[in-house]
């Protein structure tokens, strides 16, 4: 049966890192990332204010579903990571039912204080795309350390987002939940065995 793996959960839980590990173990899966699509569109089009950024983000969401549907039409195995919430559930549910896909959701959770510190550290790294932090961006813009610090998400807003948006409640199909508060405690082999059973068993 056709397979879709969704890696969801709170921001800062290491979804992209986990997706790469899964793809290394299961190379049949095609990676599809909404954040990658957003960053591509920010680089191509740029934005001068929050309104323009929102327009690009909506385009990116449409592009994401278009690419997912193309994968489904080709009967690809698909792996996708994002802090999924109720906003995405109906459309994803429609697509997997329409194309007869079996779904496994890997939902990552962790202590929110740990995640705030982890996300803050990530946003300060040069490898983090500036578009995530800014309300005006054009390709080639380089952020100084001070600008990055000035545009970090406040602790209270981060906690509120995590609690209000339902990242910890999203699931579609078979659910496998992992606590990633401490990366050294993660049982990757146990997860891989579960994926193997769901996909190839």
Image (cartoon, rainbow, N blue to C red):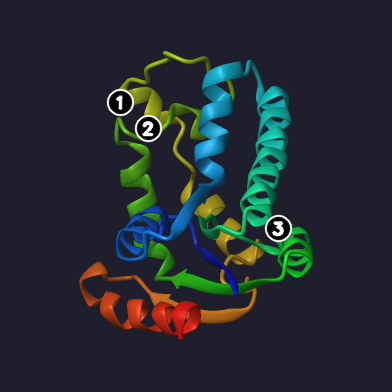
Question: Closer to the N terminus: mark 3 or mark 2?
Answer: 3
- Nearer to the camera, 1 or 49: 1
Where does label 3 land, which residue? Answer: 88
Residue at screen point 42% across, 58% down: 15
Q: Position of residue 162 (x, y in %)?
A: 56, 61
SS at mark 3?
helix
Proximity of marks 2 and 1: CB atoms separated by less than 8 Å: yes
Tell me the number on the disc at residue 172: none
Tell me the number on the disc at residue 149: 2
| Numbered disc in front, either 3 or 2 | 3
Q: Is residue 8 above or below residue 143?
A: below
Proximity of marks 3 and 2: CB atoms separated by less than 8 Å: no
Q: Residue furthest front?
A: 74
Tell me the number on the disc at residue 145: 1
Q: Is residue 138 above or below residue 152?
A: above
- Nearer to the camera, 146 or 177: 177
Q: How many marks?
A: 3
Q: Position of residue 177 (x, y in %)?
A: 47, 79
Task: Judge the density around disc 3: few (<14), some (14-19), many (≥20) Cα neighbours within 10 Å.
Answer: some
174 relative to 62 in the view: left or right: left
Proximity of marks 3 and 1: CB atoms separated by less than 8 Å: no
Q: Would you say residue 46 is visible in this rendering?
A: no
Q: Would you say residue 120 is visible in this rendering?
A: yes
Q: Position of residue 186 (x, y in %)?
A: 28, 75
Among the 4 quarters of the image, the one containing residue 190: bottom left
Q: Residue furthest left?
A: 184
Residue at screen point 47% across, 51% down: 31
- Compute the Cα span from label 2 to label 1: 6 Å
Q: Position of residue 58 (x, y in %)?
A: 72, 37
Among the 4 quarters of the image, the one containing residue 174: bottom right
- Compute the Cα span from label 3 to label 1: 34 Å
């Amino acid at each position: 049966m056709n397979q879709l793996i969704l890696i969801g959960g709170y921001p800062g839980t290491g979804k992209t890192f986990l997706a790469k590990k899964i793809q290394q173990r299961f190379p049949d899966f095609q990676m599809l990332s909404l954040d990658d699509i957003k960053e591509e569109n920010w680089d191509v089009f740029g934005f001068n204010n929050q309104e323009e950024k929102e327009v690009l983000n909506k385009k990116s969401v449409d592009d994401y579903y278009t690419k997912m549907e193309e994968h489904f039409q080709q009967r690809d195995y698909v792996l996708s990571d994002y802090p999924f919430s109720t906003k995405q559930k109906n459309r994803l549910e429609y697509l997997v039912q329409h194309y007869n896909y079996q779904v496994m959701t890997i939902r990552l959770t962790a202590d929110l204080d740990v995640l705030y510190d982890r996300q803050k550290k990530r946003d300060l790294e040069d490898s983090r795309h500036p578009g995530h932090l800014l309300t005006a961006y054009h390709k080639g813009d380089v952020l100084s350390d001070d600008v990055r610090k000035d545009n970090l998400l406040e602790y209270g807003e981060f906690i509120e987002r995590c609690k209000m948006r339902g990242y910890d409640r999203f699931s579609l199909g078979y659910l496998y939940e992992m606590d990633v508060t401490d990366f050294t405690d993660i049982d990757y082999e146990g997860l891989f065995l579960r994926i193997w059973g769901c996909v190839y068993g």
